[in-house]
Image (spheres, rainbow, N blue to C red):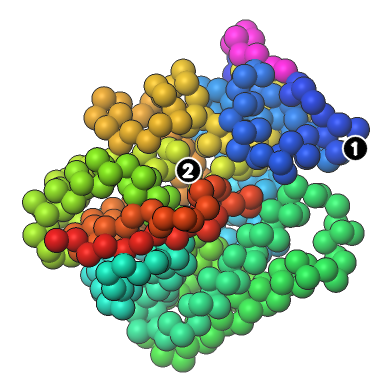
Amino acid sequence: MPRATDTTSPTYTMADRSGALPLLGHTPALVRDPLKFLAGLSGHGDLVRIRVGPHAAYAVCHPDLVQRFLAEDRTFDKGGPVYDRLREIAGDGLGTCPAAAHRRQRRMIQPLFHRDRLPAYAEVMSERVAALTSSWHDGQILDVPAAMHRLTAEVTVRCLFDAGADTSDIPEVQSSIDALISGATRRVLLPVPLVHRLPTPGNRRFHQARRRLRQITDTLIADHRSAGADQGNLLSLLLAPDAGGTGLNDAEIHDQVISFLLAGVESTAVTLSWAWHLIGTHPDIRQRLRDEVDAVLDGRPALPADLPALELTGRIITETLRLYPPDAVLSRTTTADTVLGGHRVAAGTTMIYSPYQLHRRADLYQDPDRFDPDRWRTIGRPPPGTWVPFGGGARKCIADAFALTQASLTLATIAAHWQLHPALGRRPVRAARQAVLAPHRLSMRLRRAG
C-alpha cells in the first residue's frame, strides 16, 4: 500500500526534463552550467524527472511540495547521489545519517546550540576576527575565500572542539575539505565507481585528504581524552556515556567530528565570501553598511545583543543566502511507495531539491537575480518552502542560529574597520563547479575604513 503524503487530486504538474542524451542523460548540461540547469527546472513542472548518467531522479521544484518533502523525513530520507557521496567522507554523522539514527544524535548534540551559548561563542568569533585582520594592510589584495575559510575553521575548532586547540593544522583542514568537496562533486556528476578507483591525480587527492582529515580528527579526540575533563563542548558530549551507559563508539565519534568540521567551516565561509563580493559590487550598500556599524558599534566588536540593531547586516546575510545558498542541490531517497503533489512515487526513487532553484523563482521573488537586501523589509519571514538554505523539518541544520550569528557578527566587525573593493583587472567572479556553491577566484582590495 502506498503511504499517502498528499491525498489531494493532482494539482501539481509532473514532466520530463527535455534534452537527455543516451547513456549520459543530462550530465553534459549539468557539467556545462549547473546553476542554469537547476534554475530552469521549474519551467518544466513542479516535479521534474531528470537523468544523471543512467540514473533517473525527480526534482521537487514547487515550494509547497518542498515543504512537505522536507517535513516527512522518514518517507524522504537522506540518500541519493549527493548524500551517498557525502557519506564516503562523513559516514553517518548528524547531517548524513538516516532518519532512524537522527533523533538520538540530535537530542545528544542540541544543547551545544542553545542560544544561551551564543555570547561565549561570540567572544571566540571576535578574538579570531581580530587575529585574522591584525596582519591586513591598506591596499592589500586579499584572497577572500581563503581568509574566510581560515576564520571559520578556527572558530569551529575552538567553539565546538577545544577552546585551547593548536590551530596549526587549520590550513590542512581547509585544503583537505576543498579536495573532498571537489572529489564528491566528480562522483555525483560521474556515478561510475570504477572511474573513481583509478589512480588519477584527483582520486589520489581525494583519498589523501580523507586520510589526513581522519588523522587530524584522531588528534582532536585523543587530546580531549587525555585531558579527561568535561569541557562542555562537542567532544565532551560525544565521549560521554548516554542514558543507557554506553555512548558512541569511536567510528561514530569520528563521523560526528568530521561532519561538523565540514559543515561548520565550509557553509559560513562561502556565505561570507559571497557577501563581501556582493557588498563590494554595490557601493550604495557598502556605504549604508558602514553607516550602520559606525552607529551601532562605534569601532568595537559586534556582540549578539547588537544583532537587532544591525538590521541591514542581517538582511545582507539573508539575501546572500537566497542568491547563493551553500548547498545548491541536495538529494533524498523514498523509503516507501508514496504520493507527492498527487503523483505516485515508488519506493527507492531518488529525489532532489535545489535551494538555488527555489530562491531564483520569479513568482516568489521580484527580480530574483538582483541583490536587494531591502526586499526582506517587505517579505519579513519568508513563507514555508521558499527560503531553505538550512533545509527544513526535523533535518533542518542544527547550527543555523550559530551560522547566522557568526556570519552577521563577522561581517559587522570587519566592516567597522575595513572596506573590501573589487580588485581592478581581476577576472569576473563566478561560482565554482562543485557541490558547495562557492565563489571561484575572488580577490578584493582592502581599504581601511575611516
The quadrant of the rendering that contains the N terminus is: top right
Rounded to the nearest angstrom, the CA distance separating label 2 from label 1 is 31 Å
Q: Main secondary structure of the magenta part?
A: loop
How far across and down, in percent of the image, does residue 274 sit? 43, 50
The mark nearer the N terminus, 2 or 1, is 1
CB-based contact (under 8 Å), mark 2 and mark 1: no
Q: Is 75 on the left-hand or right-hand side of 125?
A: right
The quadrant of the rendering that contains the C terminus is: bottom left
Q: Quadrant of residue 40?
A: top right
Q: Quadrant of residue 76?
A: top right
Comparing 5 with 353, the one in front is 353
Comparing 270 with 133, the one in front is 133
In this figure, which residue is indicated by the disc labeled 1? 23
Q: Is 246 on the left-hand or right-hand side of 369?
A: right
Q: Is 310 on the left-hand or right-hand side of 439?
A: left
Kindly state the secondary structure of the residue where label 2 is placed: loop
**Looking at numbered disc 2 in the image, what kind of residue is underneath it?**
Tyr
Q: Residues within 10 Å of mark 1 (few under 14, many from 20)?
A: few
Q: Residue pushed farthest front? A: 425
The magenta stretch spans residue 9: yes
In this figure, which residue is indicated by the disc labeled 2? 324
The magenta stretch spans residue 423: no
Q: Quadrant of residue 204?
A: bottom right
Residue shown at the point (66%, 22%) measured from the top left: 47
How far across and down, in percent of the image, does residue 392 sit? 47, 39
Residue shown at the point (55%, 23%) measured from the top left: 62
Residue shown at the point (29%, 73%) measured from the top left: 137
| Magenta stretch, residue numbers | 8-15
Question: Looking at the image, is 68 positioned above or below residue 131?
Answer: above
Comparing 445 with 156, the one in front is 445
Q: Is 282 on the left-hand or right-hand side of 222?
A: left
